C-alpha cells in the first residue's frame, strides 16, 4: 500500500472481505492505523474481535512474522539474481499454497479453499474436490500443544505469579550498552491475563502493556 492510513486500510480490507467474508478475529500490531477509533469502529461494525499484540513482543504475531521471513528471503534471492521479483513471488506463493504441511498433511489451499491447487505438479484434466478430515484441527491442536510444552521446557518457563497491585521493575529498550537492564522507577501491576501484563508508572502515571518477560 502506498498510503497506510486507517481509511486506506479499511478500504483494502473491504475488498478482501467482499471475497472471503468477515473473519472472527483480526490480529494487528500497534500501528496508528490499527489503534485508531476509525479502525476499531469498523471492526466493531463487522463483528470482528480486534487483538493488538503486546508492544515489543513480535512472538505474539508469529503466524505473520514467520511467513514474512520466507517472503523476504525469496525477494533477496530475486534481487541477487536480477530477476523480476513479482514473478518470483508468484512462483513462491504457488509452491507454498500447493505444498502439504508437515503437521496437517494438507496444503494451505486445501485447508482454506477445501480443494487442491492445480499446479505444475498436478496437471490433471479434472479438479477433484476433497473433504477435509474432521480430525485435522484436533491433530493440529495436539501437535501445537506438544511444541508449546517443549518450548516452555527449553526456556524454563514457569507459571505467572504476578498479582494486581504488585510493584515491579520493567525491562528497558536499551539506547546503548551502558543503559541499565531495568528502569529504576517502580511500576504497579494493573492487570494480568496470562503473560499479558498491564502496568502503571508510579512516577508519571503512564500505563503500558508488556509481556511477562519484560
Image (cartoon, helix red, strand yellow):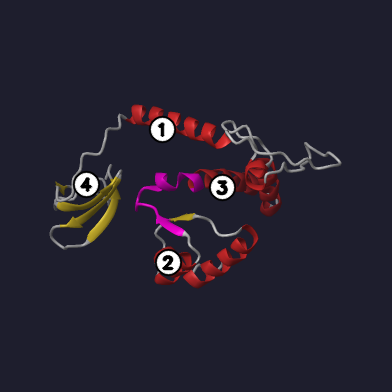
Distance from label 2 to label 3 (Cα)?
30 Å
Distance from label 2 to label 1 (Cα)?
31 Å
Query: Residue at left 29%, top 50%?
Result: 210
What label does residue 95 carry, if any?
none
**From the viewer's perspective, is 17 left or right of 53?**
right
Q: Nearer the viewer, residue 183 or 37?
A: 37
Q: Look at the numbered discs 3 and 4 and tell me whether their residues touch, using CB distance below 8 Å.
A: no
Which stretch appears magenta?
49-64
Looking at the image, can residue 3 be seen?
Answer: no
For label 1, the SS is helix
Count residues near mark 4 (Cα–Cα under 10 Å), then give few for <14, some for 14-19, many for 20+: few
Distance from label 3 to label 4 (Cα)?
33 Å
| Residue annotated with mark 4 | 178
Q: Look at the numbered discs 2 and 1 and tell me whether their residues touch, using CB distance below 8 Å.
A: no
Looking at the image, can residue 138 be seen?
Answer: yes
Q: Say whether disc 2 or disc 3 marks the residue closer to the N-terminus.
A: 2
| Residue annotated with mark 2 | 40
Q: In the image, residue 166 lies at what x, y percent?
A: 14, 47
Q: Look at the numbered discs 4 and 2 and tell me whether their residues touch, using CB distance below 8 Å.
A: no
Count residues near mark 3 (Cα–Cα under 10 Å), then give few for <14, some for 14-19, many for 20+: few
Asked if residue 58 lies in the magenta stretch, the reply is yes
Give the mark toward the camera: 3 or 4: 3
| Residue annotated with mark 1 | 148
Asked if residue 39 lies in the magenta stretch, the reply is no
Distance from label 4 to label 2 (Cα)?
40 Å
Query: Residue at left 60%, top 59%?
Result: 21
Q: In the image, residue 148 lies at what x, y percent?
A: 41, 32
| Residue annotated with mark 3 | 72
For label 3, the SS is helix
Residue 50 drawn above or below residue 96: below
Amino acid at each position: 500500500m502506498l498510503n497506510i492510513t486507517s481509511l486506506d486500510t479499511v478500504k483494502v480490507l473491504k475488498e478482501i472481505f467482499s471475497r472471503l467474508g468477515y473473519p472472527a478475529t483480526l490480529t494487528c500490531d500497534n500501528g496508528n492505523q490499527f489503534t485508531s477509533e476509525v479502525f476499531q469502529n469498523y471492526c466493531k461494525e463487522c463483528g470482528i474481535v480486534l487483538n493488538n499484540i503486546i508492544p515489543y513482543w513480535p512472538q505474539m504475531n508469529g503466524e505473520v512474522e514467520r511467513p514474512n521471513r520466507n517472503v523476504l528471503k525469496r525477494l533477496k534471492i530475486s534481487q541477487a539474481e536480477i530477476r523480476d521479483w513479482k514473478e518470483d513471488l508468484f512462483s513462491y506463493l504457488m509452491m507454498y499454497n500447493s505444498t502439504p504441511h508437515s503437521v496437517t498433511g494438507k496444503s494451505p489451499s486445501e485447508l482454506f479453499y477445501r480443494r487442491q491447487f492445480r499446479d505444475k505438479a498436478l496437471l490433471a484434466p479434472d479438479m477433484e474436490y476433497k473433504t477435509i478430515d474432521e480430525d485435522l484441527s484436533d491433530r493440529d491442536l495436539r501437535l501445537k500443544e506438544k511444541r508449546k510444552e517443549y518450548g516452555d521446557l527449553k526456556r524454563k518457563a514457569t507459571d505467572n505469579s504476578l498479582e494486581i497491585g504488585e510493584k515491579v521493575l520493567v525491562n528497558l529498550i536499551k539506547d546503548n550498552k551502558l543503559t541499565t537492564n531495568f528502569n529504576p522507577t517502580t511500576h504497579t501491576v494493573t492487570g494480568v491475563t496470562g503473560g499479558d501484563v498491564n502496568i502503571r508508572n508510579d512516577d508519571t502515571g503512564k500505563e503500558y502493556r508488556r509481556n511477562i518477560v519484560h
